[in-house]
Image: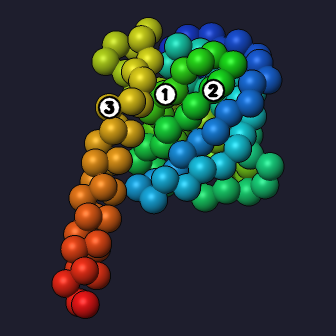
Amino acid sequence: MQDRRESVRDKVMYGGVAEIGECGATRECIVRNISNNGATIEFSNDVQLPKEQLSLRIARKGRSFLARVIWWRDNFVGVAFRAESPAEPVSDLEERLRRSEIKKRQLQRRIDELLSER
């Protein structure tokens, strides 16, 4: 199989947490290899992921990355980090803040609905 990666990946075994989709569901995973541009992660069982993006937190590196799913096979997933420049992975803080603000507005609307029904 031809390796089409732009940079070499280091073999590692880091614990991680993937935040999947708009609902904020999380799944624990193991990062098996990583580079500046992407990683291979392993879940404990088969997983279905959105093609758009997910957030990957790696506590050992003290970093969070926005990532796009490139491939998945059973419980292994290859992701590419979304970045301004290939060598600089971006933190997902802005994206998480944006989603939190959306959730906050949705909850506030629901609270207003429930209070108006009284």
Identify the mark at residue 65; answer none if there is no mark: 1
Circles 1 and 2, Cβ within 8 Å, touching? The answer is yes
Give the class, few, some or many, for how many residues have Cα within 10 Å of label 2's Cα (few <14, many ≥20).
Answer: some
The quarter of the image holding the C terminus is bottom left
In the picture of the structure, the residue carrying the numbered disc 2 is: 58
Amino acid type, mark 3: Glu
Q: Is residue 30 left or right of residue 102?
A: right
Residue 78 sits above or below residue 43 on the image: above
Q: Label 1, label 2: how many angstroms apart (C-alpha)?
A: 8 Å
Circles 3 and 1, Cβ within 8 Å, touching? The answer is no
Q: Residue 90: where, in percent of width, then height?
A: 40, 21
- Which residue is outermost to the front? 118
For the point 54% across and 21% down, the residue is 63
Mark earlier in primary sequence (2, 3): 2
What kind of element bears circle 1?
strand
Q: Quadrant of residue 14?
A: top right
For the point 79% across and 23% down, the residue is 13
Mark earlier in primary sequence (1, 2): 2
Identify the mark at residue 94; answer none if there is no mark: 3
Q: Residue 107: where, in percent of width, then height?
A: 32, 65
What kind of element bears circle 2?
strand
Amino acid type, mark 2: Ile
Q: Is residue 5 visible?
A: no
For the point 53% across and 13% down, the residue is 36
For the point 61% across and 58% down, the residue is 48
- Which residue is outermost to the bottom? 118
